[in-house]
Amino acid sequence: MIAALDEVEVDYGGRRALGPFSLALQPGEITALVGPSGCGKSTALRLLAGLEQPTRGAVTRTPGRGETAVVFQAPTLMPWSSAAANVALPLELSGVAKAEARRRAKGALERVGLAEAAKLKPAQLSGGMAMRVSLARALVTEPKLLLLDEPFAALDEITRRRLADDVLTLWSETRPAVVFVTHSVEEAVYMAARVVVMSPSPGRIAADQPIPGPLPRPEGFRTTEPFRAAAEAVSRALDHAMAGAAA
Amino acid sequence: MNPSLNRAGLILAPWALIAAILIVWQAACRALHTPVFLLPAPSDIGAALAEGWPALLRAASNTLLVSLQAWAVALLIATALAMLTALSPMVERALAPIAATLQVTPVVAIAPLFVVWAGLEHPERAIVVLAAIVAFFPIFSGAVTGLQSADKDLERLFDLYGATRAQRLLRLRVPSAIPFWLEGAKVAVGLAIVGAVVAEFVAGSGGSQGLAWRILESSHQLRTADMFAALLVLAILGVGLNTAVRLVEGRLLQAWRGR
């Protein structure tokens, strides 16, 4: 087990935003969290990252300092620093010598296919490139736990699909535990071995659906019967959760 | 409209307006025979400018020097204090009311005090301090705002990797503050000139011979054309300095964000 939330509840200003919610992450497993906006998906992610404490309940985390990485919805790069300096940041913050950090940053940029962009600043990158730099920054420490908070939400469909495959390929190299937050059922089913459906605010688990099939996904996986069946099952679970909340 | 024509129009528009005003002004003065001490015609002002040029230039360079000194002092102190507020919210709470008081205090109201403190033989010191007080606030408030403006997710990233306070300040907050600080510095340079001239007025004619002194002297002698000439030089000084700082700011911002 890499990290676990045990009956956690989070209140913001006296209002329940999440929970009670329990989730245990196994090493190397990709879990997707799907749910409507405001259901506390991002809050759950921040709890798993150790960036926030629950109001009630317990959070267990085994990764040490620098072994958890987060990719946010926006690329969240430092606009004043080059791509390479942005990627080197996690290493430099944990005391890796600058030359060594830059060398490993270059390596990480190569892995996401951006070796050429090392010297460019974020304003000179396209949205997809900036997201790749953000991904390289997350991977540069070789994390045991990788948390992705709707990382492709601002990108176009084609870039999104290509990045989805790239994330899975990168995952297969070091096999960290991954949590992938999204509001797209299709994306969740494609990315994850397990999809957790959350109910509207305050978020609870409405369904926990295993997804069959190999990871990374083979070509044409979106058109296969198991994919469609899983997507339909998750859709139904989401509809059910929404209807339950409306009633 | 043709885009290049449009562009030329945009550049020429202010000059055309100035020319139009000058022509109407000149014609009206001629037609109405206004006395020169009341409202001199542009041609009278031009003559005064041509005649008093060396003295005006000396006065302008005095005012410029004092303004730049005041600006430098304000930059130094305001930036240092803003950095202190970033290290501890307590410092910010402590400084906020004093900074606000400085901002709302009219410089003329405290000028006599500083003239006395600086000593009557050193009015230029009082002028530098007073102009620095006027220039202080925009830099300070810009820097404080900027130091708190870092992206919240970037802050979380620094949390995640266990950044120290020094790392967070130097690698995140200070760079995030640069655009705000530059904006404050730009506003401050204009205020430093205004502060210097106002302080010169109050400090009187003693040893300080800036543009305000030229204006005062001309006004006492009812040499209104000379007053206008000094005002014109002051306006050119202000606009010139502002433009220079804006160009530098633009360059630095471009380097900051790489585009």
Image: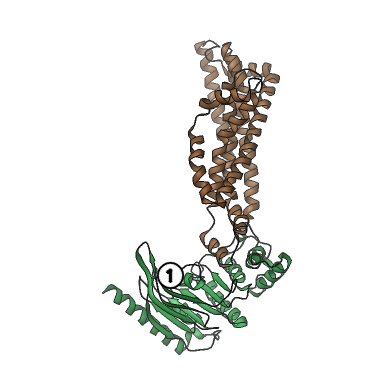
Chain colours: A green, B brown
A93 sits to left or right of B113: right
Return the x and y of residue B112 as percentages of the image width and height.
55, 23
A238 sits to left or right of A158: left
Of residues B153 and B18, the one drawn nearer to the viewer in this rendering: B153
Disc 1 chain ID: A
Mark 1 lies on residue: A54
Q: Is residue B70 above or below residue A208?
A: above
Q: Is residue B202 above or below residue A210?
A: above
Of residues B131 and B19, the one drawn nearer to the viewer in this rendering: B131
Quarter-of-image position of residue B229: top right
Q: Is residue A196 above or below residue B128?
A: below
Of residues B96 and A151, the one drawn nearer to the viewer in this rendering: B96
* Amino acid type of the residue that numbered disc 1 sits on in the rendered structure: Pro
Q: Quadrant of the C terminus of chain A?
A: bottom left
Residue farthest to the left, as pictured? A247
Task: Name the residue at 65% across, 68% down.
Answer: A91
Return the x and y of residue A224 as percentages of the image width and height.
47, 88
Task: Name the residue at 51% across, 81% down.
Answer: A30
Q: Is residue A189 above or below residue B36?
A: below
Asked whether residue B231 appears in the rendered view, the answer is no
Return the x and y of residue B204 as percentages of the image width and height.
59, 19
Mark 1 secondary-structure assignment: loop
Return the x and y of residue A233 as percentages of the image width and height.
39, 85
Mark 1 Cα shell of 10 Å, populated few (<14), some (14-19), many (≥20): many
A76 sits to left or right of A20: right
Asked whether residue A177 appears in the rendered view, the answer is yes
